[in-house]
Amino acid sequence: MTSTTRDLLLQSIRTLWADAEKLPANIFDDQAGRQSIQREIANLKYATTTPFEGVAELCFQPHQSAAVKTALEGKWFEVLADGRPKTARDIASATGAEPQLIVRIMMVLTATHVVDERGPQTYGATPMTEILLDPGWANGLRHFFDHCGPSMINLPGYLQRNGYKVPQDVKTGPFADAWGGRNTWALYEDEPERGKVFNSCMTRWKQGTRTWTDTYPAKSKICENVDKSKDTVLLVDIGGGRGHVLEDFVKDPGRRTGRLIVQDLPAALGDADSLSKQGIETMAYNFFTPQPVKGAKAYYMRSILHDWPDRACREILSNTAAAMREGYSKLLIDELVLPDTNVPPQGAFLDLSMMALETGAERTSGQWQDLLASAGLRIEKIWSTNAGLESVIEAEISS
């Protein structure tokens, strides 16, 4: 590359950067469009990175997480919370950390835009800093670092020892192999604080995101043409935990006929009295057993099946299908649907996480179709928005 060509490229990039900073904040609400832009930026970075630099970046990926975790637990981000620049000595005075340690960790955080460098050994908050000041997002980092990290580090060796086959049993999978034979849920029972961190992370993750009814036309598809009998069940939320999905559903002012039921293991269910006041029933249920609620208008699962390999999913789906009424009941699966090509990084990373943690998987539309067909179900439609990979799969009994 000549110096003239390099200078023209730099000027073009600076112009694009300046234009991007002028865009309104909501311009990137379209997640699919945003991911397209990010993909092109990544392609540009790849084109201007030498193979050596690319491999070096791969080698140094753990360093950023370690630096962020250090600053988080040291409460350094809290010192930056007021928006005013702080020196390393300011942070040291407030937290007790050595100034030179702060400087060395901050070199990583400023290089990766987690913290802004305002001058020599002087730092300020960025939007990423502000996100990490939120307890839920901070617990997200803790969850992935402390809980997922050991399993992910163990994954290459586990796959090598097991002949490079896709893990199929959570009891003997990569996570159990890394944690002394315990799966995620057993670990939470032994160490409840980990479960609290996970729940905090998941609750925050779901806040502010689209709900399934933003994607799926529930009013026209399940709230109409409902049986009028006294015990008619409109919607069953399988594995619905504390009942957040149905709580959001009942806030909609539209008219509904039928009972609303949230099912989960007893320890995971929300407060029965509080939910009952909102017209929501709680029911203890293990989805590996026959579904006790027969002939509901709709059965709903959110982020359940990606936790499990196909064999387990087939059992869960078969138990649900056996309870559905042909030509009337619907199964609504609120999950990611991966594209066949150009999977965005988030989708690819989540798929690998599910393999390492639960022997589960994110799936393409074809994989969803095959999985549902194996349990006697067919896909009526996959409902998606411009929000990216999140979709609602509408399925019915195969005729």
Image: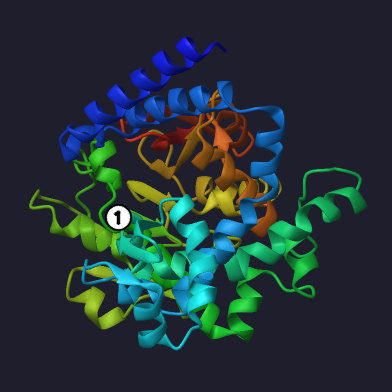
Q: Amino acid at mark 1?
A: Pro
Q: How is the image coloured?
A: rainbow
Mark 1: few/some/many CA within 10 Å (<14, 14-19, 20+): few
Tell me where residue 56 appears, x and y as whole percent.
69, 42
Check the image and report above or below for 116 versus 6: below
Question: Which of 300 and 87 lies nearest the eye of the viewer?
Answer: 87
Is residue 109 visible to us here?
yes
Q: Residue at x 46, y 80 (%)?
A: 74
User: Which element type, helix, strand or loop, lies under badge 1?
Assistant: helix
| On-image quarter of the N terminus | top right
Question: Which of 205 and 216 lies nearest the eye of the viewer?
Answer: 205
Q: Residue at x 80, y 51 (%)?
A: 156
Question: Which of 231 and 367 lies nearest the eye of the viewer?
Answer: 367
Q: Residue at x 42, y 17 (%)?
A: 7
Tell me where residue 398 appears, x and y as whole percent.
51, 30
Q: Is residue 156 left or right of residue 133?
A: right
Q: Is residue 270 left or right of residue 69?
A: left
Q: Residue at x 50, y 14 (%)?
A: 3
Is residue 216 visible to us here?
no
Q: Is residue 110 left or right of residue 192?
A: left
Tell me where residue 352 appears, x and y as whole percent.
64, 46
Tell me where residue 205 appears, x and y as whole percent.
37, 58
Give the number of marks.
Answer: 1
Check the image and report above or below for 16 versus 171: above
Q: Residue 224's image quarter? A: top left
In the picture of the structure, the residue carrying the numbered disc 1 is: 127
